[in-house]
Amino acid sequence: MTENSSPPKKKHWSRALPWLSVLLTLLAYLPVVNNQFVNWDDPNYIQFNPVIRSLAPQNLWSMVSNFHSGYWIPLTWLSYALDFQLGLLEPWIYHLDNLILHGLNTLFVFFLSLKLFTFVREKDSKLPADWPVFSAFGGSLLFGLHPLHVESIAWAAERKDLLCGLFFLSSLLVYMELAARPTRKKYSLCLGLFFLALISKPMAVSLPLVFILLDYWPFRRSNKFSSVFLEKTPFFLTALLAGWVAFLSQTQVGASWGLNQSPLSFRIMNACHSLIFYLFKLLVPVKLAAFYPILLEKTFSPDYFFSLLGVLLITFGCFIYRKKKPFLLTAWLFYVITLGPVLGLVQVGNQAAGDRFTYIPSLAPILLASGVFFQLLSQRRLILGLLGILGAGFLGYGTFQQSSVWKDSITLWENTLRVCPLNNLIVHQNLGKAYEDAGRHDEALSKYRDAQNPDHNFLQPLWGEGRVLSAMGRLDFSIKKFREALALNPHFPPLHSDLGMVYQKKGLEKEAMGEIQEAIRLDTNYAEAYNHLGIIYRSQGQEKESLEAFQKALFLDPDNPVYLRECLKTCQATGNFKEALNLYKALSSHSRPLLASAF
């Protein structure tokens, strides 16, 4: 056996490399821990989600048996519930856990890529002995530090990305062991981890196809295709079931778009554009935004055509070189297949692309780049070594800066409008809500009006404008805006409930009661409407009815601090001090400002 063909010797310093990549990653993400929640999914997933506020059996059952916010992701809900037990609604708890999960994923990427690169080096003795460990270090560092991944970590509501990534990578790691030495225990573990990935986020449905890619290269198991495909049958059946459930859950909340909203031609062209767009962002991670709007008018634009041409050329090139350089075809197909569920061919949501979608798909180009870089490094150590250090510094700085973009809702959406100013109605709406919550009413009105478009029946900005006008005391104008919003959708309970409160401010008790009752008729489980009903009853001196309404609201949403506060006020008014003391204790565990406002 020649010196080059001998297996690489383990060096003590190499054991520190995975931990170094994790440490550098955690340092780059330090700003995340001080970030607040943002008004994009965080309220529905965490702040106002009654399901996560207890580990009681009925809550655990609800996580498993219901669709929440358009998803069936019970493991993600459970992780939030555990965070709630640790720190209630303190944002740093949720952000810290996201960061820990990303650190674990970075560690998994190291060991996964080390196994892959070691296998490749065993087949090609011309590669340097230390190439696998250095390439694995580079791959994990790129994965950990890349600014394109900030959205998945800094956004508390994207916990599903990180949990899915953790079990996706661990299932992949077990499969690599399974392919080398199959056992029933490994097979069961691999399937179990795949299932955990799916119930964290359904994007993991692509994993069985990834296994087949690895069978093609580097494991070369394709000569046993029938048996190889047969062993994946349980994985494919699980993936199909998860895909069906995901489609049902998105359809239930109206997130799926029809062809009349998003034509097939646009979906195909946008899918090709996204494939090139994400590669470009991996190469040049600048002008990253939380929301990239759908622009139907760009369907046949030059950049979309160039993207289509780019996809065809890359695919053709990888196919031509499939025998000489099979890793190119595997890397490209891994990238395309793992992105497949979010390329918009089945359009879900109103975004054209999303940085978070690259969390797992970016692994293929990252490992390819790392492997090539460290192969070249052995020939030009000084120049490429300096470039590597500069590149890592650039990525770390970019991640540090991008993490600060997610500091709060105002910072996030102001940055998004700077990057994507055109036709971004959703962002104007979200920024308007952020200004509204901050009490910046004039700016909120301006943004809500920017979000309105006669070509889009979008009631949210009208609703927001009505709320702000009410807060400013311009009640007649507020009522007008609520009526305009109700003309778009008369069956939306929150609109009726909020309109009822405006009538109550004007002293129109009959109209107020009518709107609140209509909201309850439309949704008998709408807790906020019962809370508003309790406020109206209390203003009329009907303390008994007020208490019953608040108790109904708390039955539907037991730990909601706003409902606790209002119920406490009614108990104080009626002299029910024993119940008031219990409510006081419950409220004190939530928020001191809310507690102070109860008196």
Image (spheres, helix red, strand yellow):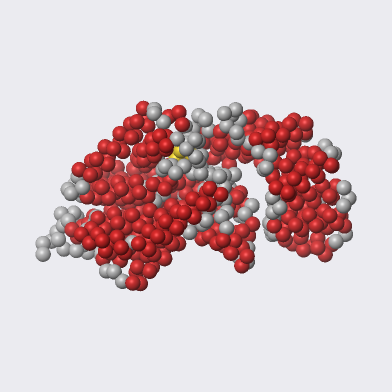
Residue ID at (37%, 58%): 236
| Nearer to me, 145 or 583 | 583
Residue 442 image point, x, y percent? 68, 31
Residue at the spot x=17%, y=48% of the render? 324
| Residue under the image location 42 percent in, 34 percent down | 266
Left or right side of 437 for 575: right
Q: State which quadrant residue 589 falls in.
A: bottom right
Q: Horizontal and vertical percent for residue 54?
A: 63, 63
Q: Who's the residue at 58% across and 64% down the image? A: 60
Does 256 sit above or below residue 480?
Answer: below
Residue 212 in sight in this render: yes
**Count of numbered marks:** 0
Position of residue 416 in the picture relative to residue 227 (left or right) = right
Residue at the left extreme of this rendering: 1
The one nearer the camera, 530 or 523, is 523
* Residue 33 visible in the snapshot: no
Viewport quadrant of the N terminus: bottom left
Residue 122 image position (x, y, % from top left): 19, 60
Q: Position of residue 384 (x, y in %)?
A: 26, 44
